[in-house]
Image (tube, grey):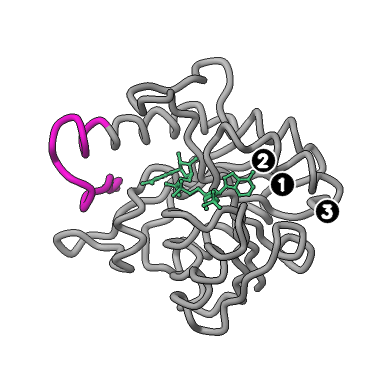
Amino acid sequence: MKLGVIGSGNIGKGVGSWAAKVGYDVTFSGKNEAGSKSAAQAAGHGAKAANVRGAVEAADLVLLAVPYGAVKEVLTDIRPMLRGKTVIDATNALSADFSSLTLGFTTSAAEEIAKLVPDAHVVKAFNTVFAQVYASQNPKIQGKAISVFVAGDNKEATEQVQDLVTKMGFDAVNAGPLKSARYIEPLAMLNISLGYGQGLGTGMGFTLLR
Ligand SMILES: NC(=O)c1ccc[n+]([C@@H]2O[C@H](COP(=O)([O-])OP(=O)(O)OC[C@H]3O[C@@H](n4cnc5c(N)ncnc54)[C@H](OP(=O)(O)O)[C@@H]3O)[C@@H](O)[C@H]2O)c1
């Protein structure tokens, strides 16, 4: 399975490297190619670097890991290439000081992204877990796997993402349709608020016991 990563920063590097480790054919991309090259080198396991178009062209799955404010610019350029592909949205629409969300209740970052690329299958995932957890490549805290909430309108695309999440060792929670991103994104805001505001740190995550 080929994963194209757009945005080789904290999240792109963390999830992309882990995906490479569990057998995905990963290509990193971003604004500057030097960052993508160093991400690919650090990831190993055959990971490559390319420009955004190159990373998306060959991919079955595309991980969108850029600041929400950059999404429109990134997607406008590659919209036709995303037809029929699964786009994993890991973004959070944060205010400039990271203290609140700029979208909610009646829409979500994921739903706005789906409007920009209507021919792609957008799936929300990975946004409620800190990049530091992905960098650690350890999905468990005190023996329990952290939950990663997955929401999407296309069954096959959602299953593809759940499969990646599970292979990484996380607890994949099917959160239903893409509209559920309205509830998943505030959970990410709570995560940030607990981790930074309340001083719990970034080595934490939510686990859904059931
Ligand atoms: N950090 C976390 O713990 C965390 C957790 C969950 C979700 N998220 C979400 O994940 C997303 C990425 O966060 P991050 O922490 O990984 O940010 P980051 O470290 O700043 O990385 C963002 C990446 O996006 C790239 N980028 C920016 N504009 C671009 C463009 N126009 N075209 C292509 N690439 C572009 C940047 O490239 P350059 O380096 O070349 O500028 C950079 O590699 C955000 O939406 C964030 O809210 C973050």
Position in image of residue 113 (x %, y %): 66, 34
**Residue at label 1?**
121
Residue sitting at 42 percent across and 54 percent down? 10
* First in sequence: mark 1 vs mark 3: 3
**Residue at label 2?**
153
Position in image of residue 60 (x %, y %): 71, 64
Q: Quick one: 110 or 207, which is closer to the camera?
A: 110
Residue sitting at 75 percent across and 65 percent down? 54
Name above or below for residue 63 compared with residue 105: below
Res 81 label: 3
Question: Local crowd at mark 2 within 10 Å, few (<14), some, or many (≥20)?
Answer: some
Residue sitting at 79 percent across and 44 percent down? 77
Q: Secondary structure at mark 3?
A: helix
- Residue 197 is one of the magenta-drawn residues: yes
Question: What amino acid type should be assigned to the residue bearing mark 3?
Answer: Met
Question: Local crowd at mark 3 within 10 Å, few (<14), some, or many (≥20)?
Answer: some
User: Do the CB atoms of the residues marked 2 and 1 lie less than 8 Å apart?
Assistant: yes
Task: Report the magenta residues as a range.
Answer: 193-210
Q: CA distance from mark 2 to mark 3?
A: 20 Å
Residue sitting at 75 percent across and 55 percent down? 85
Label 3 CB sits under 8 Å from any ligand 1 atom: no
Question: What amino acid type should be assigned to the residue bearing mark 1?
Answer: His
